[in-house]
Image (tube, rainbow, N blue to C red):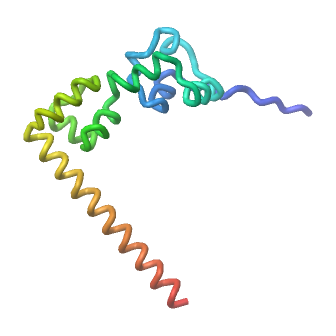
Amino acid sequence: MKSHQTAQTMKPATAAKKLGVYLEATPAEFREGVVSRTELNALQADPPEWLRELRRNGPHPRPVVAAKLGVSISGLARGGVTEALTTEQIDALKAENPEWLQKERATQAEVRKEAARIKEKHKAQNEDAQNKE
């Protein structure tokens, strides 16, 4: 018996998420088709101009906006940001530095600090357990 592999494909929304771009801003031919794993790899390895432009100027999906602002996706929602933003809009928000953004950045910094503390605690516990063996 011969087994032949079929090309693994994904919906455009999944591919856009993996590429870190806002689906609605992609070209129609990208949104209307399916994307194979090979095509995705090619887009990542040698992005066409439309993809480079989207990554550079946006509009960016919420996870990218959150990362660029240094807040969580929930923090974006609490700040009233529910739409995709362009790089220019993100830069303007950073320059304006509204109170909600300052608060969410502080919250995010605390979350990261706590995660690092817990990671260190687990590491120390694992080392203690190994030393007792």
**Quadrant the C terminus occupies:** bottom right
Question: With 131 as the anchor, is 125 left or right in this view?
Answer: left
Instruction: Report whether 109 appears left or right of 29.
Output: left
Kindly give the residue lying farthest to the right in the view shown: 1
Residue situated furthest left in the rendering: 99
Whole-percent x, y for residue 88 in the image: 24, 24
Residue extending farthest bottom: 132
Give above or below for 31 relative to 61: above
Question: 92 or 102: nearer the eye?
Answer: 92
Q: Quarter of the image holding residue 102?
A: top left
Say whether residue 44 is left or right of residue 16.
right
The picture quadrant where one finds residue 117 is bottom left
Could you say where residue 8 lies in the image, as x and y percent from the top left?
66, 28
Q: Eyeballing the image, is 20 above or below 58?
A: below
Is residue 68 positioned above or below 31 on the image? below
Q: How many marks?
A: 0
Residue at horizontal 51%, vertical 14%? Answer: 30
Rendered-image quadrant of the N terminus: top right
Where is residue 9 drawn, in percent x and y? 62, 25
Q: Outermost residue, top direction?
A: 28
Q: Residue at x 84, y 32 (%)?
A: 3
Give me the residue at 47% from left, 9% from top. 28
Could you tell whether 60 is left or right of 81 in the image?
right
Residue at x-position 40% and y-position 21%:
54
